[in-house]
Image (cartoon, grey):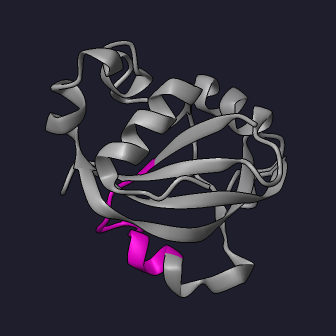
Amino acid sequence: MAYWLIKSEPDAWSWDQQVQKGAAGETWSGVRNHTAKLNLMAMKRGERAFFYHSNVGKAIVGIAEIAREAYPDPSARPGEPWVAVDVRALAPVPKPVTLDAIKAQARLKDMALLRQSRLSVQPVSDAQWNLICRIGGVAAP
């Protein structure tokens, strides 16, 4: 199983809003970066993603699940190549993991969040996932 990190500014779309969508989840649309698009296209149903509040808060606040694999982004203009996935909230992170906490971990120095800070959809390695879950107080599956 692959792991991901999806970023959203909480004043545009917050973890609380994602949770309110319940089991149906919500379309993760509006991504307009080709690398992020490729990451969306690589996502498989059932994979997990950290939900990261960017700009305000700068912390991993929840764990989401990919509910539907990539399909044409309904917010794109006709003929544009953008895709969306559907995402549903699974659980909050008991102790949100801040950007500063991530930067403080030498084992996370290669994380895309630190190397490609503007990338809104990014892969997370198994080791990174497990360490962040431990830091955030997430129970092992």
Residue farthest along the front direction in this orientation:
140
Q: Position of residue 20 (x, y in %)?
A: 52, 86
Q: Which residues are magenta?
A: 7-18
Given residues 28 and 5, the one toward you in this image is 5
Judged left or right of residue 85, residue 4 is left
Q: Position of residue 40 (x, y in %)?
A: 70, 39
The C terminus: image quadrant? bottom right
The part of the image, by quadrant, that contains residue 89 is: bottom right
Given residues 30 and 117, the one toward you in this image is 117
**Residue 57 can be seen in this image:** yes
Q: Position of residue 101 (x, y in %)?
A: 18, 37
* Count of residue discs: 0
Q: Is residue 114 above or below residue 39?
A: above
The part of the image, by quadrant, that contains residue 42 is: top right
Given residues 126 and 120, the one toward you in this image is 126
Tell me what residue is drawn at x 34 percent, y 21 percent.
108
83 in the magenta segment: no
Judged left or right of residue 110, residue 95 is left
Judged left or right of residue 114, residue 100 is left
16 in the magenta segment: yes
Q: Position of residue 5 (x, y in %)?
A: 50, 41
Tell me what residue is drawn at x 74 percent, y 80 percent.
24
Tell me what residue is drawn at x 45 percent, y 79 percent.
17
The part of the image, by quadrant, that contains residue 33 is: top right
**Residue 120 can be seen in this image:** no
Tell me what residue is drawn at x 58 percent, y 60 percent.
64
Q: Is residue 12 above or below residue 59?
A: below
Given residues 9 and 75, the one toward you in this image is 9
